[in-house]
Image (cartoon, coloured by chain):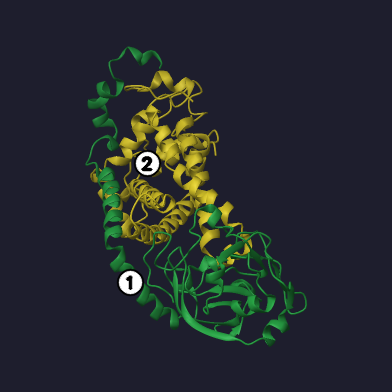
């Protein structure tokens, strides 16, 4: 979704993008450079995590839902897929820590400011107006989701390991681990569906995760407090008023 | 790194400016607290699990009895049997094509049809079923021919010490020592819950070893072979105990089922 010449000028007048995201390119208003949202490293972390999580959920369903278990069978194979995809699920994030951009985004996900409180309050009131939903690079919902997912994956991995290596802990631990693993799986599945549903509802957000770049108008509407670092495009680099790339790997 | 590599630490150097320009660089580290909170909740749930599980199981069992939708069957510990198969698909057999062979170290190798098994004296047992993965189904009636009767009819030779079971799914196998196999609570089961054994439950014929974890009760039973030693079965090759007494094996302490 690139802006067409002509429409760009009008939008500039009606919307007020943050000052340093206003594009001043060689072509003037004719081209609107797309903003760098996710570096290749971050997109690969997301992609590999999604594949592993998908394998884990599908194999879990084949072990757990009677109809699927009956259809698929092959229990030893499905168990192998489940345990290995499960224990590897945290790996992409851990490897991603080597990327400065990824660490910076983890920092953003960690911090909750006053605007996040406003966003959450609006969300609870089902207030969808952009002006009542201030957000930086990540909105408060995304931050909560990230923290929930990180915690849940750690608990699932921990309880999974206790069930896998039966000699690790006394039996009562294993039974308890099974209990926690089963119930948290249910709640994890629900929020995963929510995550996928949100992505399906927002093509530009998906494009950001797929290509790394987003439409600045989308960014101004959905993430008005976000100040993208680094060059938004090669020709935009000189225009960046502030600190510059801060070590962000170039795409 | 690019031309910024000259800076001592770009992130530190920019911190003041970022505080002004990036709303997400300041604020309380709520994300970290939430992750730690989830870990704490997980540990707490582990500690409370024995108590919680008992409450939930009885609660869900009560709901499941009046649940016309069957949704409770999908909840953890919702009660009922779970379907486990080690192969991709299992052929369906009925009175027309089912055969159970008894061979190996016996005087009279035999092959039974389903109606021949039905014509033999039947025993009925009502015990709990305990799976090694944790689920338990209370007071489940099984009915069939005592394994001991079939062994007796085949004439076990002196050198036989164990019994191996094979299944028409093509992969599963189990075994018992001869002493275990001759117990009165070990059946070649034809009926479960007073109905003919359904395919999903291992029908038309399965083994039922009441005092042991349910993986010993091989589904889709098609062969009984007398051997001169115990040959570990399918899951036992993958780490399960061969002598699978409920509550005294596999590191578990469930209440015995027999």
User: Label 1: which residue?
Assistant: B54
> Above or below — where is A34 with respect to A25?
below
Of all chains in the rendering, the one displayed in green is B
| Residue at position x 40%, y 78% in the image | B61
Q: Position of residue B51 (x, y in %)?
A: 28, 68
Residue A127 is left or right of residue B185, and the answer is left
Vertical relation: B23 (above or below) B207: above
* Local secondary structure at mark 1: helix
Picture coordinates of residue A110 (x, y %)? 29, 41
Which element carries disc 2, helix, strand or loop?
Answer: loop
**In front: A220, or A187?**
A187
Give me the C-alpha separation between circle 1 and circle 2.
47 Å
Taking the spot 36% from the left edge, 28% from the top edge, the residue there is A20
Q: For the point 36% across and 35% down, which residue is it? A: A105
Q: Which chain is yellow?
A: A
Q: Is residue A227 visible?
A: no
For residue A124, side relative to residue B221 (left or right):
left
Residue A153 in view here:
yes
Q: Residues within 10 Å of mark 2 (few under 14, many from 20)?
A: some
Residue B197 lies left or right of residue A54; in this view the side is: right
Q: Residue A223 carries which label?
A: 2
Q: Is residue A115 left or right of residue A251?
A: left
Q: Tell if the residue under mark 1 belongs to the same chain as the one under mark 2.
A: no
């Amino acid at each position: 979704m690139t802006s067409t010449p002509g429409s760009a000028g009008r939008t500039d007048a009606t919307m007020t993008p943050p000052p340093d995201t206003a594009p001043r390119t060689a072509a003037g208003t004719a081209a609107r450079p797309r903003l760098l949202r996710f570096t290749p490293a971050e997109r690969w972390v997301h992609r590999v995590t999604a594949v592993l999580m998908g394998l884990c959920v599908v194999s879990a369903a084949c072990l757990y839902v009677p109809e699927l278990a009956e259809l698929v069978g092959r229990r030893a194979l499905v168990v192998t897929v489940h345990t290995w995809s499960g224990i590897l699920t945290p790996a992409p994030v851990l490897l991603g820590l080597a990327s400065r951009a990824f660490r910076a985004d983890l920092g953003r996900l960690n911090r909750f400011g006053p605007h996040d409180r406003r966003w959450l309050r609006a969300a609870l009131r089902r207030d969808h107006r952009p002006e009542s939903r201030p957000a930086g690079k990540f909105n408060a919902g995304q931050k909560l989701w990230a923290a929930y997912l990180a915690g849940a994956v750690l608990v699932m991995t921990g309880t999974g390991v206790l069930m896998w290596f039966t000699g690790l802990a006394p039996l009562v631990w294993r039974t308890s681990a099974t209990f926690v693993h089963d119930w948290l799986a249910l709640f994890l599945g629900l929020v995963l569906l929510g995550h996928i549903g949100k992505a399906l509802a927002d093509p530009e957000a998906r494009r950001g995760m797929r290509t790394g770049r987003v439409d600045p108008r989308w960014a101004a509407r959905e993430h008005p407090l976000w100040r993208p670092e680094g060059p938004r495009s090669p020709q935009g680099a000189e225009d960046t008023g502030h600190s510059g790339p801060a070590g962000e790997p170039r795409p | 790194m690019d031309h910024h590599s000259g800076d001592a630490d770009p992130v530190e150097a920019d911190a003041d400016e970022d505080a002004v320009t990036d709303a997400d660089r300041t604020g309380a580290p709520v994300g970290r607290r939430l992750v730690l909170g989830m870990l704490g909740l997980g540990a707490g749930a582990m500690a409370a699990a024995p108590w919680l599980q008992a409450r939930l199981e009885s609660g869900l069992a009560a709901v499941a009895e009046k649940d016309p939708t069957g949704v409770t069957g999908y909840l953890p510990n919702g009660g009922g049997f779970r379907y486990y198969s080690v192969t991709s698909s299992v052929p369906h057999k009925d009175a027309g094509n089912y055969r159970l062979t008894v061979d190996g170290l016996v005087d009279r190798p035999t092959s039974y049809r389903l109606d021949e098994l039905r014509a033999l004296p039947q025993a009925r047992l009502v015990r709990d079923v305990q799976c090694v993965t944790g689920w338990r189904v209370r007071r489940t009636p099984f009915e069939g021919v005592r394994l001991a009767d079939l062994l007796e009819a085949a004439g076990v030779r002196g050198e036989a010490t164990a019994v191996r079971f094979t299944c028409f799914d093509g992969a599963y196998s189990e075994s018992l020592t001869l002493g275990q196999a001759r117990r009165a609570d070990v059946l070649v089961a034809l009926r479960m819950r007073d109905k003919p054994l359904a395919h999903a439950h291992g029908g038309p014929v399965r083994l039922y070893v009441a005092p042991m974890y349910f993986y010993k009760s091989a589904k889709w039973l098609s062969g009984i072979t007398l051997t001169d030693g115990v040959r570990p079965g399918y899951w036992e090759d993958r780490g399960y105990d061969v002598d699978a007494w409920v509550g005294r094996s596999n590191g578990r302490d469930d209440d015995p089922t027999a």
